[in-house]
Image (cartoon, rainbow, N blue to C red):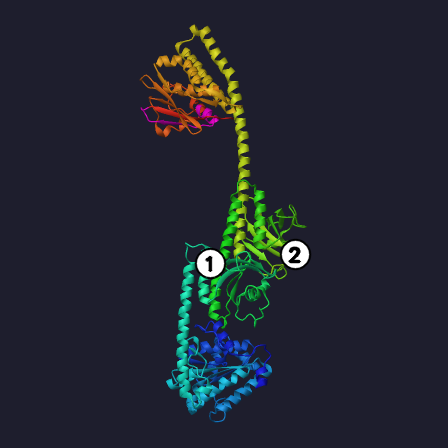
């Protein structure tokens, strides 16, 4: 059989694992497939126990299909189904049966061609037939894959012992040859006794779309030997013991898992507190003395202790060693869980942790930290460990390591995002300074050399470098190349990120960025801007990158791009706003100049109109009738009102155009002069003026006199039928004074209080209360020119209170 065992052109011997793989990968087979953990029990031979044709073909057809795909020869022994039915089923399952038959890769035989070819069934003859079939198969194929429908048994009714003997001999045949066998048993047609024996003689069973290890499997030498009853009792008791021990281990494992989940899910514990509890849990689970976590770098042969569970003579935070002088190489070399239970036998007896630290047992796992320093999470003991570490212990340690990995990555992402937010929110730095810090952050995060921002326009194939993080031979500010010659051409939509780690495979072997610029790694995102060129934020390196960029890296770049987009849009809006403000200011200045010039130039014509009308009346008054005299009075009155409006407009324009330093103004003195100017109006109306002691403010004396004059005059004018009473008060409000001029006059409807501050807006006709409609507008202009605000609180027939504020100190 040595020739058979070495046959075939493939590198691997055909075995049961390939059959299990076929079922795992099949969409037709819906059940779970239990992995092999003890190949000695497999024997490359398993049984399918089915109850319907659907279940039968769901297992058999993937088995055949995989064999043909692997270049093996497949033998199907038909009995329950006809040859035509089997070939039709193969075609339904995507197997090109006709081509396979023509090439000889597929053979479909009957029971007469195989089991009963000598007229009756003989186990040895059938085994010899299969051995010869394997020899024939390996001459041109990778091995032989056999499956047979066992219902042929009912034809000649062979002895059950012969059938079981045959099944036992199959178990001895296939481990030594490049072949695999699948026996098919229809449970509806075989007796329970036969099915029971089939189960006992096959190490793996397929039933009800589930592939299982067979706890009831009995090796042939025990099944057929004279000590069968005693062996069966031993196996049954051993199975019970194994199952009980396995159940106890499972419960113990689940208990530790529950404790771990409780620790890691506790929101009230810090990372360090959770880590300490995990150390204690691991020491208990693995029966070791000390838990620890270290920072490692395999390329630099570096190891630094970061956390330990307890005091130790040598292991303490900050201790550094060459990585090669520790047991952690057992984990870093395979980037998984590794262990050392016999340092001398495993070649670790000449390293520091063995000779000087006295460590005799180690179990650790590798923790890869994206964008940061990798770690090892491990447990050690000074006492030797007689037994090696189990797969369950390794699996539990890897679960702990996965949590550590998640936490370290999560903490790093939080730190990076916090740094990004701090950069963005720093009001003391300019946009260019923030961009430079952003470049530094990205280069560190993505392990790339250069960051940059470029203007792009796919419609014109434009790529123009706008800013870069450092000096570069080609990528410098202002340089322009075709977008199609850069890696940024892959960015087709706003917010999209793209990474290039293998330029030649990604179609950039002829691009300028690769050939001349020497860029071998790229990560970029597209930033869409309304009313401006789009941008790309990108990072590049001349050294190639071994692994593709992760989703976490792409997400972080996208966040960076969003901030850049916000800043660029903000700058664009600021520029547009400044331009609009400048235009409005220029327009406003021209309007002010025009209003001042127009009102000033109107003064003389109005005086002439009034003078000539009065001269006309004095010289020709006797000749004019009463109606003409009335017309002249109307004209003189209109010219007078026009002159008053022009005077008010001039005063308004002077306030708007006033410049220069404010000076201290005593409001008591201002009010005294105003009262003197309004003496006649006060006496005629019998007005009572009550006032607080007023403060000194910084302002324009002339304008403040105008302000008090207008407010006091209005209070007297709109007093109604009763003698007016006006009260002027003042109160302090933080850094400003608030004045109030209150009267008990006719009041104002609340919905009209905003209109009275508009130029030429009047609430009464001239025949009721004469005026120009500019006085309160002028008051508002004066107050705002002094940096204050003015408002009115009023109700009809209940008086009005005009309140305004003036800062205590003010420099214009």
Instruction: Tell me: residue 51, above or below residue 570.
Output: below
In the displayed structure, does residue 589 sit left or right of residue 721? right
Neighbor class of circle 1 (other Cα within 10 Å; few <14, some 14-19, many 20+) is many
Instruction: Tell me: residue 122, above or below residue 741.
Output: below
Can residue 767 be seen from the camera position used here?
no
CA separation, marks 1 and 2?
A: 46 Å
Residue 753 lies, in percent from the top left, at: 38, 28
Residue 89 lies, in percent from the top left, at: 47, 78
Residue 380 lies, in percent from the top left, at: 51, 65
| Residue located at (47% from left, 63% from top) | 400
Q: Quadrant of the N terminus?
A: bottom right
| Residue located at (51% from left, 15% from top) | 604
Q: Quick check: is 781 in the magenta stretch?
A: yes
Using the image as rendered, state which of residue 353 and residue 657 is in the foreground: 353
Q: Quick check: is 351 in the magenta stretch?
A: no
- Looking at the image, tell me whether mark 1 or mark 2 is earlier in sequence order: 1
User: How many labels, in total?
Assistant: 2
Bounds of the magenta segment = 779-798
Identify the secondary structure beneath mark 2.
helix
Q: Which residue is mark 2?
A: 514
Identify the secondary structure beneath mark 1.
helix
Q: Which residue is mark 1?
A: 275
């Amino acid at each position: 059989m040595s020739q058979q065992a070495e046959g075939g052109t493939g590198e691997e011997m055909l075995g049961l694992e390939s059959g299990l793989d076929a079922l795992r990968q099949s969409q037709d087979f819906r059940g779970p497939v239990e992995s092999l953990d003890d190949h000695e029990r497999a024997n490359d031979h398993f049984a399918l126990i089915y109850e319907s044709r659907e279940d039968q073909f769901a297992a058999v057809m993937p088995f055949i299909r995989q064999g043909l795909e692997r270049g093996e020869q497949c033998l199907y022994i038909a009995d329950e189904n006809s040859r035509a039915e089997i070939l039709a089923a193969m075609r339904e399952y995507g197997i090109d049966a006709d081509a396979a038959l023509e090439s000889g890769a597929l053979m479909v035989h009957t029971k007469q061609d195989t089991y009963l070819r000598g007229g009756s069934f003989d186990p040895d003859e059938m085994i010899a037939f299969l051995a010869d079939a394997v020899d024939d198969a390996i001459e041109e194929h990778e091995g032989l894959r056999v499956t047979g429908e066992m219902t042929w048994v009912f034809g000649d009714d062979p002895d059950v012992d012969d059938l079981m003997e045959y099944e036992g001999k199959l178990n001895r045949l296939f481990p030594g040859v490049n072949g695999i066998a699948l026996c098919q048993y229809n449970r509806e047609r075989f007796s329970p006794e036969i099915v029971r024996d089939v189960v006992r003689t096959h190490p793996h069973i397929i039933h009800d779309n589930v592939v299982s290890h067979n706890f009831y499997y009995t090796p042939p030498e025990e099944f057929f030997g004279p000590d069968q009853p005693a062996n069966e009792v031993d196996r049954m008791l051993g199975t019970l013991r194994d199952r009980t021990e396995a159940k106890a281990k499972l419960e113990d494992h689940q208990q530790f898992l529950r404790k771990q989940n409780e620790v890691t899910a506790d929101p009230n514990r810090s990372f360090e507190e959770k880590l300490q509890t995990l150390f204690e849990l691991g020491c208990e689970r693995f029966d070791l003395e000390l838990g620890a976590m270290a920072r490692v770098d395999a390329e630099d042969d570096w190891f630094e202790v970061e956390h330990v569970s307890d005091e130790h003579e040598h292991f303490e935070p900050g201790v550094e060693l060459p990585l090669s002088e520790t047991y952690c190489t057992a984990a870093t070399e395979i980037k998984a869980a590794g262990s050392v239970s016999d340092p001398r036998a495993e070649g670790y007896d000449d390293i520091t942790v063995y000779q000087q630290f006295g460590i005799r047992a180690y179990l650790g796992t590798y923790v890869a930290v994206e964008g940061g320093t990798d770690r090892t999470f491990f447990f050690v003991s000074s006492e030797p460990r007689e037994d090696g570490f189990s797969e369950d212990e390794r699996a539990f340690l890897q679960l702990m390591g996965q949590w550590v990995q998640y936490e370290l990555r999560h903490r790093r992402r939080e730190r990076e995002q916090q740094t990004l937010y701090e950069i963005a929110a720093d009001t003391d730095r300019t946009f260019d300074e923030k961009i430079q810090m952003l470049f530094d952050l990205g280069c560190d995060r993505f392990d790339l050399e250069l960051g940059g921002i470029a203007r792009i326009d796919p419609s014109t194939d434009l790529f123009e470098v706008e800013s870069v993080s450092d000096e570069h031979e080609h990528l410098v500010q202002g340089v322009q190349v075709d977008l199609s010659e850069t890696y940024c051409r892959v960015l087709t939509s706003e917010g999209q990120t793209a990474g290039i780690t293998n330029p030649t495979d990604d179609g950039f072997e002829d691009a300028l960025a690769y050939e001349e610029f020497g860029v071998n790694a790229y990560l970029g995102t597209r930033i869409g801007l309304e009313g401006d060129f789009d941008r790309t934020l990108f990072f590049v390196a001349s050294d190639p990158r071994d692994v593709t960029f992760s989703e976490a890296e792409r997400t972080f770049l996208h966040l960076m791009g969003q901030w850049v987009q916000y800043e660029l849009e903000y700058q664009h809006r600021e520029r547009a706003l400044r331009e609009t403000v400048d235009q409005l200011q220029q327009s406003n200045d021209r309007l002010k100049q025009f209003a001042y010039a127009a009102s000033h130039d109107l003064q003389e014509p109005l005086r002439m109109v009034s003078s000539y009308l009065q001269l006309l009346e004095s010289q020709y008054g006797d000749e004019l009738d009463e109606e003409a005299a009335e017309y002249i009075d109307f004209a003189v009155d209109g010219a007078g009102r026009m002159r008053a409006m022009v005077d008010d407009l001039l005063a308004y324009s002077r306030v708007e155009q006033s410049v220069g330093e404010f000076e201290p103004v005593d409001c008591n003195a201002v009010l005294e002069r105003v009262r003197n100017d309004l003496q006649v109006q006060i006496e005629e109306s019998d007005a009572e003026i009550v006032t607080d002691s007023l403060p000194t403010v910084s302002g324009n004396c002339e304008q403040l006199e105008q302000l008090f004059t207008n407010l006091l005059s209005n209070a007297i004018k709109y007093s109604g039928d009763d003698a007016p009473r006006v009260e002027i008060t003042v109160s302090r409000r933080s850094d400003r004074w608030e004045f109030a001029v209150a009267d008990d006059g006719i009041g104002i409807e609340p919905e009209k209080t905003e209109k009275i501050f508009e130029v030429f807006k009047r609430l009464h006709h001239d025949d009721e209360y004469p005026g120009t409609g500019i006085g309160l507008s002028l008051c508002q202009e004066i107050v705002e020119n002094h940096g204050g605000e003015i408002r009115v609180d009023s109700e009809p027939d209940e008086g009005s209170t005009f309140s305004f504020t003036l800062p205590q100190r003010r420099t214009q």
